[in-house]
Amino acid sequence: MLSAAAFVDKKAPVKNKKDLPATGSGFAVLELFTSEGCSSCPPADEVLARVQKEAGDKPVYVLAYHVDYWNRLGWKDVFSKPEYSKRQYQYSRQFAGQVYTPQVIFNGRAEFVGSDEPAINAAIKEALNTPAPASLNLQGKQSSAKLDLDYQVTGDAANSQLMIAVVQKHALSVVKKGENAGRTLSHAQIVHELYAIDLPAGKKGTKQIDLPVGFNSKDWEIIGLIQNSETGLITAAGRASLSAAAPTL
């Protein structure tokens, strides 16, 4: 599901922003690593939910990955996957080996404590005012439990993959054990699946993905990221425009 390539250390040479032509509008991707077993995580979940709500139609994309390394401490997070823990550890090579919850990775280039709302808002403001080196267009057609996703990338996408996240916008969970025992937790932007797609030479194509039971365009969304496989930097992001496939006769 996830790319096998590990992200390089943040000191690795990357292209300067000035060397990359601006082809897309500014964007902000916030990847929250969280867990129902962590008592410090609910405030971060609330911050990211508020950020998403206040963003409105702005190109701000929140992805909440529930890691699995808290599961051994008394409560198994139903949304957790080892793939998400792996993704966080890949990022840790850029950020001095820091792996903790709640952690936010911002555009693949900076990290914050997930509940640090002032720092997150400042980073979003700066990112939205910084033209991006690439842009991403996603169009999806749903047919039953499948989605045919057309994608096209414009601009710089060297050494990059298209990451596709299947996201549930909201869920409630009653936690019975662990640090949050007895609490009903509200979650936002939960990543259920994450796909890595190698971009073809023409930087466009179609990918069919599986959809979770109950998927619908109101309560779920598809978010795409263009991410450098070597550095972890995200150069473009976008939501898929979803429609139903035409019925076959």
Image (cartoon, helix red, strand yellow):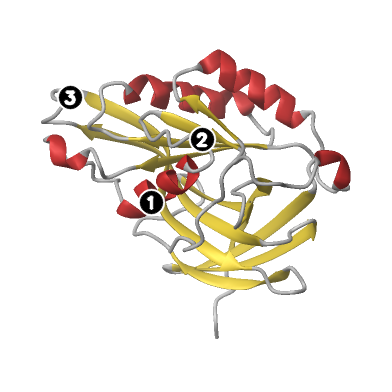
Q: Amino acid at mark 1?
A: Lys
Give left or right: position of 73 versus 130.
left
Mark 2 Cα-neighbour bin, 10 Å: few <14, some 14–19, many ≥20: some
Kindly tell me whether residue 173 is visible in this rendering: yes
From the top left corner, tell me how far across and down residue 109 is, in percent.
Answer: 62, 37
Residue under numbered circle 3: 179
Could you say which disc has been placed on residue 86 in the image? Answer: 1
CA gap, disc 2 to disc 1? 15 Å
Q: Position of residue 50 (x, y in %)?
A: 50, 22
The numbered mark at residue 100 is none
Badge 1 or badge 3: first in the primary sequence? 1
**Image height check: is 232 above or below 195?**
above
Q: Residue at x 61, y 19 (%)?
A: 121
- Nearest to the eye among marks 1 and 3: give it: 1
User: Which residue position holds label 2?
Assistant: 95
- In the rendered view, would you say 214 is above or below 120? below
Sequence-first tag of 2 and 1:
1
